[in-house]
Image (cartoon, rainbow, N blue to C red):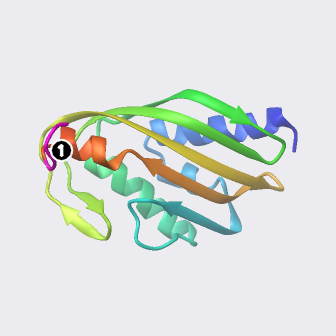
């Protein structure tokens, strides 16, 4: 794929995430893929799992807005830094456990790396700043 095609695929992913469209996000993935997130105990390897993963974030932060702050693109991969804002008014899943809503707002940061083959994502690695988010939600002391 060209870098422009990778950018368009990545833009579709960001639009799906910002639009809270779990189905559109899942559609970006190939038939065989792996999603790894530092907050998930196991890799996600099914589209239903990807939909649940995305919907979990949308449920925890129904007003979430996401934007990229930096992006690097190659012929088969994209890496980006993102920032999101939202208010935790729904339950949140972390490490397989449900955390009740706090009602607090956060400005979160994170990065992701996606590898692409034949126009679809085959590997997605997500690194949200869990510690920063937990501090803002009141689960950890501010440093």
Instruction: Give the tally of numbered discs.
Output: 1
Front in this rendered view, residue 71 or 121: 71
Badge 1 crowding class, 10 Å Cα cut-off, few under 14, some 14 to 19, many 20 or more, is: some
Residue 67 in percent (x, y) is at 48, 29
**Secondary-structure class at tag 1:** loop
Which of the 4 quarters of the picture holds residue 64?
top left
Q: Residue at x 25, y 69 (%)?
A: 97
Residue 36 horizontal side relative to residue 64, left or right: right
Verify whether residue 19 appears in magenta: no
Q: Residue at x 14, y 50 (%)?
A: 139
On the question of residue 92 being in view, the answer is yes
Magenta highlight: main SS: loop
Verify whether residue 141 appears in magenta: yes
Question: In the rendered view, would you say 134 is above or below 4?
Answer: below
Residue 63 horizontal side relative to residue 16, left or right: left
Spot the residue most to the top.
Answer: 69
Q: Disc 1 designates what residue?
A: 89
Spot the residue most to the right.
Answer: 2
Question: Quadrant of the image for the C terminus?
Answer: top left
Question: Quadrant of the image for the N terminus?
Answer: top right
Question: In the rendered view, would you say 5 is above or below 22?
Answer: above
Residue 80 in percent (x, y) is at 59, 37
Give the residues drawn in magenta, as a range: 139-143
Residue 52 in percent (x, y) is at 42, 63
On the question of residue 61 being in view, the answer is no
Residue 84 horizontal side relative to residue 48, left or right: left
Residue 54 in percent (x, y) is at 44, 54
Residue 141 horizontal side relative to residue 40, left or right: left
Question: In the rendered view, would you say 133 is above or below 45?
Answer: above
Which of the 4 quarters of the picture holds residue 132?
top left
Q: Residue at x 80, y 48 (%)?
A: 76
């Amino acid at each position: 794929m060209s870098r422009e095609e990778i950018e368009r695929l990545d833009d579709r992913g960001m639009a799906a995430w910002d639009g809270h469209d779990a189905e559109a996000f899942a559609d970006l993935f190939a038939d065989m893929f792996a999603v790894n997130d530092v907050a998930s105990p196991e890799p996600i390897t099914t589209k239903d799992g990807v939909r649940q993963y995305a919907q979990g974030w949308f449920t925890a932060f129904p007003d979430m807005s996401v934007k990229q702050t930096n992006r690097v693109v190659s012929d088969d991969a994209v890496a980006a830094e993102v920032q999101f804002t939202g208010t935790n008014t729904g339950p949140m899943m972390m490490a397989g456990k449900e955390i009740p809503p706090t009602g607090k707002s956060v400005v979160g940061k994170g990065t992701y790396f996606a590898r692409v083959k034949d126009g679809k994502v085959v590997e997605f690695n997500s690194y949200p700043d869990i510690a920063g988010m937990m501090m803002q939600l009141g689960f950890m002391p501010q440093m």
